[in-house]
Amino acid sequence: MKVLVTGGAGFIGSNFVHRTLATRPDAEVTVLDLLTYAGSLSSLEGVRDRVRFVEGDVADAEVVDPLVADADVVVHFAAESHNDNSLADPSPFIRTNIVGTFTLLEAARTHDVRYHHVSTDEVYGDLELDDPKRFTEDTPYTPSSPYSASKAGSDHLVRAWVRSFGLRATISNCSNNYGPRQHVEKFIPRQITNLIDGVRPKLYGDGLNVRDWIHVDDHNDAVWTIVEKGRPGETYLIGADGEVNNRDVVRLVLELMGRDPDDYDHVTDRAGHDRRYAIEAGKLRQELGWAPRYDTFRDGLAATVEWYRENEAWWRPQKDATEAKYARTQKVLGR
Ligand code: NAD
Ligand code: DAU
């Protein structure tokens, strides 16, 4: 099978490429990635010679069209993905997440290619801490940030292309991923790499916001399950029953790194900060037979801490290169 992976030099996309080549040795993988600040060829180390890599923009139809024409399936990960950045400057989010998706959809419809759209649970807005409900495929869309609104817009485009043009497309909306090769701007790598550098963890607001953590390999196995067994036109939520509040994540990271679990600071909250995400993944589990392999968040997090300890050569250049951008964003956001 010829697979076009957009965003394959980013966190989830690169893990998808590694996992695909490990589990489906016959797959022919092409990666299309713009190599923004968030993408790096170093994330494809070890599989680089088994992958065709194209540096280019998903919003550029001239680049996209022939690559889609040559694929059996497109798995679309490429995106601007960080909420804080979308608060400081929304414009690249609109171009990449909306225009980029539109461009891929047009190519997939022209060449009648199977398309899988990787999206987020953030399109459903947030839940109260004591709400007994979780997100399902029927929850109405109420995105809070420019990032999540741009992803919601892209999901709506996919559904319109299915209904109006009969595109063979599926959508998945997943909760927060963790694991190797995640950019240091994100919560868990930020705390681990800061602690290695002797900097105390920073919790936004009261730290009681809840995220529903899933290991990136479990997410990517679910994506393959949907590509292979999902019904065209359907949406599947992906989650691993991993609800933990941010304070407890930080305390666990501190403990796993041999520090005092109370050794963290509170800082100015994120504007519009979603309180809680929680996924009910029954449709994916029951219809398609998927189940996560990582039993506990603690085990997955311990392995992730180890990965960052052992792979400073991967994250240090990225951290050095993006520290000025990070500091500017934090300043704009009042921290
Ligand atoms: P990431 O920011 O780590 O990687 C994004 C990749 O896309 C980078 O390699 C970047 O260079 C590339 N890219 C950006 N703009 C591009 C463009 N215009 N053309 C081509 N390539 C471009 O993101 P991630 O965390 O790996 O997220 C991947 C996808 O999964 C996104 O669509 C995101 O919305 C979704 N998602 C992420 C999470 C999560 O927890 N990280 C959870 C659910 C869904
Ligand atoms: O739910 C899926 C989404 O998860 C994906 O769609 C996004 O691409 C991905 O970035 C992630 O979004 P979040 O905003 O939840 O992730 P982030 O890592 O930015 O933050 C996780 C939580 O931690 C959030 O409540 C904010 C908080 N936080 C974050 C940072 C960077 C802190 O308290 N301190 C920090 O330094």
Image (tube, rainbow, N blue to C red):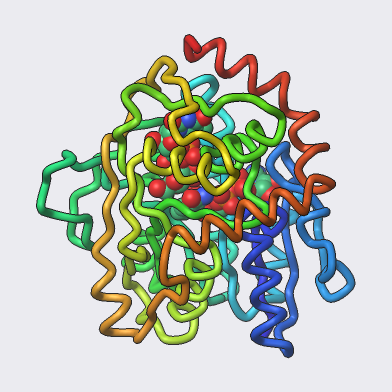
Q: In this orientation, does residue 121 appear?
A: yes
Which residue is painted at 18% across and 60% down in the image?
138
Q: Depth check: give the residue in front, 171 or 238.
A: 238
Residue 86 visible in this rendered orientation of the protein: no
> Which residue is at 63% across, 33% downward?
195
**Residue 171 falls left or right of residue 302:** left
Quick check: which quadrant has ligand 2?
top left
Q: Quadrant of residue 38?
A: top right
Q: In which quadrant is the N terminus drawn?
A: bottom right
Q: Is residue 134 left or right of residue 304?
A: left
- Residue 45 drawn at (x, y percent): 83, 62
How many numbered dots are placed on residues in this image?
Answer: 0
Give the quarter of the image for residue 321.
top right
Going 72% across and 58% down the picture, which residue do you hit? 32
Provide residue 304's location: percent of width, then percent of height.
60, 55
| x and y, in percent, of residue 305 in the image | 62, 51
| Residue that appears at 19% across and 50% down | 140
In the displayed structure image, the side of residue 140 where residue 290 appears, left or right = right
| Front-lying residue, 192 or 92 | 192
Extreme residue in the bottom direction: 26
Q: Nearer the viewer, residue 331 or 157?
A: 331
Up/down of 98 relative to 269, above or below: below
Q: Against 41, is 52 above or below?
A: below
- Expressed as whole percent of the image width and height from the top left, the position of residue 121 reads 34, 52
State whether residue 23 is above or below residue 180. below
